[in-house]
Image: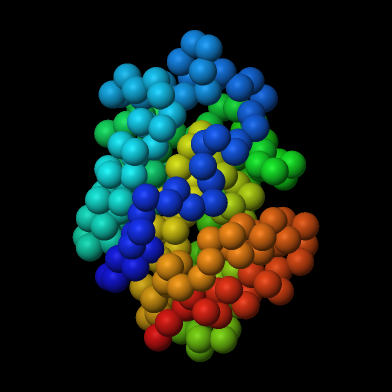
Amino acid sequence: MPQKFWQGAGNKGIEGMASYSVNALTDDCYQGTTVLINKLNINNQGDLDAVESAIVPAKAALWEENPLMVSFDFAHYCAIHKYLFEDLYEWAGKIRTVDISKKGTPFCPAVQIESTAQAVFSRLQAQNYLRGLNKTAFTNELVDPYERTNELHPFREGNGRMQRVFLSQLTHCAGYELDFTCIDSDDLMIATIQSAGGVDDFLKELFTEMIQD
């Protein structure tokens, strides 16, 4: 599977830790900081970002080369997160216990994550994982699991990076490829915020550019 997403992987994408708001800013963080407690005991955000930028893209490339799951359910989703972040965080692959938001947009409340995830991934299963669709139909349909999993945001950190691995694998199994590097990340941020408000025209335009035969 192509590893296009991970070109220029030093960019954390649309979900950097520093831009999150949480219900208790120091939950799971080193005392007096907003740096998440990690296995390497790094308590400086810049240093932690640098280590993540080295480890996570390499793990993502390995997953894309040899995926360990193909069920495309919530267990699969969590397994990707665990694989990408298990070298850094004890809670890799485990759903968050705090409520978080970004730029004024709240994500799924922690207490509703499991039930909401069941609905999201059951819908994907009912759609036969978007297989057998022409490119236009596939593009339009892929926007929905992107929006739903973005709203879900089930993990304390790393949601955007693992979401891209999951969607890239889903796209590959449906006979297409998903290239996040061909669009501007700021445009994706804007489109994602717009879609959270119910307007997804711009997001569909971007996915039309990203999806390739």
Asked if residue 127 can be seen in this view, the reply is no
Q: In this view, which residue lies farthest toward the front? A: 46
Q: Position of residue 7 (x, y in %)?
A: 33, 62
- The picture quadrant where one finds residue 140 is bottom right
Residue at 26% over, 49% down: 59
Q: Position of residue 3 (x, y in %)?
A: 30, 66
The image quarter containing residue 205 is: bottom right
Left or right relative to 122: residue 100: right
Residue at position x 32%, y 19% in the image: 41
Q: Is residue 140 above or below residue 23?
A: below
In front: 93, or 3? 3
Q: Position of residue 168 (x, y in %)?
A: 40, 66
Residue most extreme to the top: 31
34 versus 49 height, above or below: above
Closer to the camera in the image, 113 or 181:
181
Which residue is pictured at 48% across the width and 52% down the height? Answer: 13
Report the residue at 60% width, 36% height from top.
20
Above-or-below relation of 76 to 124: above
Colour scheme shown: rainbow
- Where, quadrant-wise, is the N terminus in this rendering? bottom left
Q: Position of residue 145 (x, y in %)?
A: 57, 62
Nearer the observer, 5 or 48: 48
**Count of labels shown?**
0
Q: 125 left or right of 195?
A: left
Q: Could one spot residue 11 in this view of the protein?
A: yes
Q: Is residue 98 above or below residue 71?
A: above
Figure quadrant of the C terminus: bottom left
